[in-house]
Amino acid sequence: MPLHVPPAPPPALRTVLTALGSPSAVREARTPALRSAQGSVTAELPLPVHVLDQVVPQGDRRPRTRLAGWRFLIRCGDRAIAAADTMLTADGWAFSHFFEGPYIASTERALQQAEALPGGYQPRLLSVPELYMLTLWLHGDREADPAKGRPAPADLLVPLAPAPPGIAAHRPHRVADLLPVMTSRVTPLPLLGFPA
């Protein structure tokens, strides 16, 4: 079943299109692929980027997420060559930066894999700073507000490559199954007592 990609806030898209149309913004970007692109480039597949603020639950508090921005894949021809991030400021949505690297191809691959999954999902990105990890978050409520919510136990997380050691990239995991693994990765081991 196809993914339901939510529309980005129009001001976020406008800031990315303005930056793409600015020779100085493209020239100053640390993205050789974007600077050397031949032909037209487009901003596609807007994905809300949420940050998981705390992996390890504390007391009754489950891990929380917050919207950090929107990411657009920048396509030239038949492939994504870069991405553009936007962020919410006091004045509204603003272009943040262009970038490239392994997460671009990994995001495209994860989205293609997700299209083949049964059921319908709303794709989002979930950043886990404590693990230096980025996942494709497949939210089960396709009509949900893309700026809100937290991962539900039945939602799927697809770790993008490079994934942390011991967590397989491009393998869909239910949140209820992956969250304990992520928690064990950030929980400090107890110090061993040594005789005095």
Image (cartoon, rainbow, N blue to C red):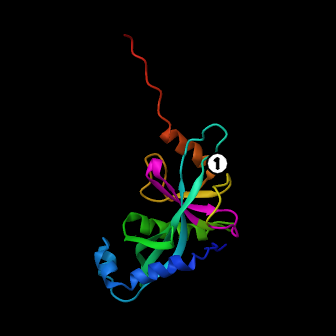
The residues colored magenta run 124-146
Percent coordinates x, y for residue 182 in the rendering? 53, 45
Name which residue lies at 32% across and 73% down: 29
Instruction: Tell me where residue 183 sits by quadrant.
Output: top right
Query: What residue is pinned by disc 1?
Result: 176
Helix, strand or loop for disc 1 = helix
**Looking at the picture, how far across and down is residue 26, in whole percent?**
33, 79
Residue visible at 51% across and 66% down in the picture:
69
Q: How many marks?
A: 1
Furthest-bottom residue in this view:
39
In the displayed structure, 36 sits above or below 188; it is: below
Residue depicted at 43% across the width and 80% down the height: 75
Q: Residue at x 29, y 79 (%)?
A: 27
Residue 118: x and y, percent? 67, 66
Say which quadrant the C terminus sits in.
top left
- Residue 172 visible? The answer is no
Q: Nearer the viewer, residue 145 or 31?
A: 145
Amino acid identity at mark 1: Ala
Q: Is residue 139 one of those drawn in magenta?
A: yes
Assess whether residue 26 is covered by the magenta stretch.
Answer: no
How many other residues sit within 10 Å of disc 1, few (<14), some (14-19) or many (≥20)? Answer: some
Quadrant for the N terminus, please.
bottom right
Q: Is residue 30 visible?
A: yes
